Amino acid sequence: MNPNWKPGDQIISPVDQMIEIELDKIPPAEKYKLLIGAIVPRPIAFVSTRGKNGISNLAPFSFYTGVSTAPPCVLFSIVNHPKKGLKDTMRNIQETGEFVVNSVNQWIAEAAHYSSEDLDYEINEFERVGLTEIESTVIQAPRVKEAAVQMECKTHQIVNIGGNGPGATNLVIGEILKMHIDERIYSDGKIDFNLYQPVGRIGGPGYVHDPQITNMPPAR
Ligand SMILES: Cc1cc2nc3c(=O)[nH]c(=O)nc-3n(C[C@H](O)[C@H](O)[C@H](O)COP(=O)(O)O)c2cc1C
């Protein structure tokens, strides 16, 4: 960052020689490594669902973002499991059309990470990782009590990419019906970033936390 920079100033960049990679010439695992290394840091949707069988499920998804405000929607992407096809989260969303996106705050980062464990559909992942399952107010999917933000969502649209083959993905677009926000972090319609303490995902096994914040003047 250069706090003294002004529009029109010369920019000194270390970028020089470029490597060109045509994505259709490299294997899927290599493409994945490039995407998760290049698109960083990523927020994490900690998604809780409940299947028709009544069993609750939890999993983190970092191909995630907010996409609209009218209606207010989030989007996250569920890549098919190489062996079982649909992941449990996707199966539950297909069955019920409902899910909760919980935040990953520093105090639950490890639990969120371990909830990505590949478990049988019949296992309740709240119990497995030791988080508290609480009921939602407008949908049937449960919330994570320890998460500072919990968004009750209903499916707006599911967009399939790549059919059913290996690497095939479903983009889940969900409309947020209700937000629950820890009152400590909420003031005057805003969320205090420093108290929120979100954790992001980078490439490989890395997570980012305690980021350095720089406020810029308006671009005008
Ligand atoms: C931080 C983190 C981010 C992840 N992001 C994604 C993602 O964006 N899409 C995806 O399909 N899997 C992602 N995974 C893997 C899933 O969490 C994992 O496959 C999980 O077992 C799915 O659970 P489920 O079968 O209960 O739905 C991620 C894992 C971690 C630890």
Image (cartoon, rainbow, N blue to C red):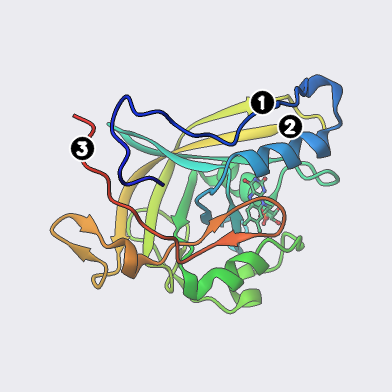
* Most foreground residue, 52 or 175: 175
From what the image shows, is residue 128 above or below residue 10?
below
Residue 51 visible: no
For image coordinates 75% across by 63% down, the residue present is 119
For image coordinates 32% across by 24% down, the residue present is 8
Q: Secondary structure at mark 2?
A: loop
**What's the mark number on residue 161?**
1
Work out whether mark 1 precedes mark 3 in sequence or the reverse, and give the earlier one.
1
Left or right: where 30 falls relative to 135: right
Label 3 sits on residue = 218
Q: Where on the picture, by quarter, is residue 201?
A: bottom right
For image coordinates 50% across by 64% down, the residue present is 209
Point out the residue furthest to the left here.
Answer: 188
Label 2 sits on residue = 168
Three-letter residue code for mark 1: Ile
- Gap in Å between the C-alphas at discs 1 and 3? 38 Å
Work out whether mark 3 precedes mark 2 in sequence or the reverse, and give the earlier one.
2
Q: Where on the picture, by quarter, is residue 169?
A: top right
* Most foreground residue, 53 or 49: 49
Work out whether mark 2 precedes mark 1 in sequence or the reverse, and give the earlier one.
1
* Most foreground residue, 180 or 10: 10
